[in-house]
Image (tube, rainbow, N blue to C red):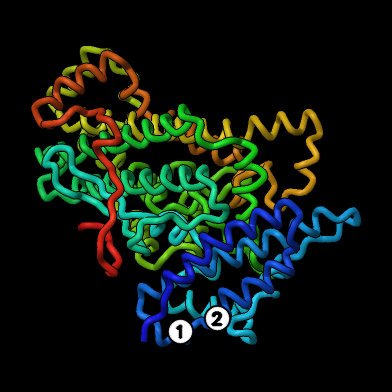
Amino acid sequence: MTYDTYSLKEWTFSEFYPMNTKVLQGELTAEEMARIVNHHALMELPAIDTLNSREAWQILTLLGIFAASVERHAQQAVRRQASAEEVIPGRGIAMLLINGKQPFLEYFQALADRLNHPHRDSFITYIEMNGPCAEVTNPGTGQPLYRLGDLFEDGAFLTFTGNVQEKEFITLLKKSVSLQGAANLLMEEALNHPEGLQARKAIQSLTTAATFMFGIRDLIADFIRRAPFSTDFFLDEFRQYAIPWYADRKIKASSAANDDSALLRDLILFTELIPPREGFSGFRSHVRATYHVLLPDAVARLERAMNRESLEVRVSQALQLDLETLLTLNESQIAELLQNHPWLAACLVLYRAQSEASKTHFSTIMKYLVWPKRKRDKTSDPREQVTVVPNVRGSTGMEPMGIMMWLDQARAHHPLAVLGHRSSVMQLCSTILEQYSSHPIEMPFEELVTFYQIASRTYSVPIQ
C-alpha cells in the first residue's frame, strides 16, 4: 500500500499557506483552522505500519508544519486577549484529530518513534531534509563529497508561511549545513589519518575544510548583503512558529542551535569550547542537552567526538607546546615553525576560517534579533506584547548576549585563530599550502555547494 503524500503537499501549498495568512490577519480563528485541517488533511491518514520509510518521513514533516501552525495561532489568540490569560502549550494541537477520532499527538508520536525522531517538528525535517538535494563538491577533485537529501523529489520547500523570505532562509541554512558536514568529514579524515597530521592527504583535507568554512562565511554575508529577509517578518511571523508543543515538558524547537553538524565542528576543533562557569555547565553539557532533538546517528557522532582527542590537543602534542605559547613567538620563530611543520599552516587557516564563519553568523543574530528588539523596546512597540516566542532570546532559549556571544568569542580568541588572523602569518600559510592544494583557499560558495533534484524516492544520505 502507498499513500499519496504529494496530494497532501499540494493541498499545503494551495490551501494551508493562505489559511495561515488569514489567521494572522484575523479573518480566521485557530479553531476554524483546526477544523479545516482535520477535515481536509488529517481525515484519511494511513495506519503507520503500512507506510514505507520515505512516506513516514514525508507525513511526519507535513504534520509538523500543521501542528506548529495551529498551536502558534491558538497560543497567540490567548496573548491577544485583554484578559492576558495564561498561555498553556498544547491547546491548539489538542484540537487536531487523525481520521476524525485519534488524538493528533498519539499518531504523531507513534510515527516519530518509528523514525527515532523527537516528538515535535525539528531541524532535521525543516532544514536537512527539506527542498532539493544539496551537494558539496570537492574543489580539488571536482567529485561529490557530501550530500543532504530531499524528502520530496519535486524539490519544493515546505514552509510555514509560503513566503519567499522563508524559502531564502531555509536555503541559507541547508547550504550552510551541507558545507559544514563536508568540512567535518574532511577534518575527521585528517584526524584519523594513519600517518598523522603531517600526511599530505591530511594537510589537503584540513585546507579544503577551511575552504568550506570560508564558504559558509561568504554564504551568510551574501544573505545579509542581499537583504532577502526583513526583521519584521522574522520577529512577527517566521520565528513565532517555534512555539512549545507541550505544557509538561520542554522539547527544543527547530533551530540552528540544534544543528548537529555545527556542534560536531566545535567538538572536533576544541576540547571544551566554553569551560563550566557560573550559570553554564560547559560546552559538552550544552551539546548533550540537545540530544533529545537529534537522531541516534547524530548523537553517536557527537559522543565519538567527545571520546577522542580534539584537533587542538593533537596540534599541541605534535608541537610539544602549550598553544598559548605560540602567541609569544616572534615572526621569525613562527616562520621557522611553519617551515618545519607545514601541516600547522593548514590548521591556522582552518581555525581562522571557523572564527570568521562564527563572527558572520553572530552578526545575523545582532541584525535580525538583538538590534531590532532593542529598537522596539525603546518605542514600546505593541507587537512585542502578542509574541508567543519571546524576541528577547533565541527560539531554544539561548541568550544572544550570553551563551551565543560566549561561543563566538571563544572561537575567535583561541590561540590558533588569533595567530591565523595575523596577516604576515596568513601570507606565509597561503604560500606553504600552494604545494599541497590545487585550489584557492577561498572560493566562491556557488562553486562549492549546489541544489539539484533527483528522480528517485530513495532518501539521499551523506556520501561517506
* Of pointers 1 and 2, the one earlier in the residue sequence: 1
Vertical comparison of 429 with 68: above or below: above
Vertical comparison of 33 with 215: above or below: below
Taking the image as drawn, is residue 29 in sight?
yes
Q: Nearer the viewer, residue 43 or 67?
A: 43
Cβ atoms under marks 1 and 2 closer than 8 Å: yes
Q: Position of residue 253 (x, y in %)?
A: 57, 57
Q: Nearer the viewer, residue 216 or 39?
A: 39
Residue at x-position 25% and y-position 66%: 456
* Other-residue count near label 2 (Cα within 10 Å), few / some / many at <14 / 14–19 / ≥20: some
Disc 2: which residue: 107
Q: Position of residue 183 (x, y in %)?
A: 28, 44
Instruction: Kindly identify the amino acid type of the residue bearing the numbered disc 1.
Output: Ile
| Alpha carbon separation for disc pair 1 and 2 | 8 Å
Asked where in the image residue 197 lies, by quadrant, the reply is: top left
Q: Is residue 55 left or right of residue 16?
A: left
Vertical comparison of 212 with 284: above or below: above
Vertical comparison of 339 with 230: above or below: above
* Other-residue count near label 1 (Cα within 10 Å), few / some / many at <14 / 14–19 / ≥20: some
Q: Position of residue 355 (x, y in %)?
A: 39, 32
- Dot 2 falls on a residue whose secondary structure is helix
Q: Position of residue 214 (x, y in %)?
A: 32, 32
- Dot 1 falls on a residue whose secondary structure is helix
Q: Which of the numbered marks, if any, corresponds to residue 392?
A: none
Residue at x-position 54% and y-position 47%: 163
Q: Is residue 424 left or right of residue 389?
A: left
Taking the image as drawn, is residue 309 in sight?
no
Residue at x-position 39% and y-position 33%: 357
Disc 1: which residue: 48
Instruction: Kindly identify the amino acid type of the residue bearing the numbered disc 2.
Output: Tyr
Location of the N terminus (image quadrant) = bottom left
Residue at x-position 69% and y-position 70%: 248
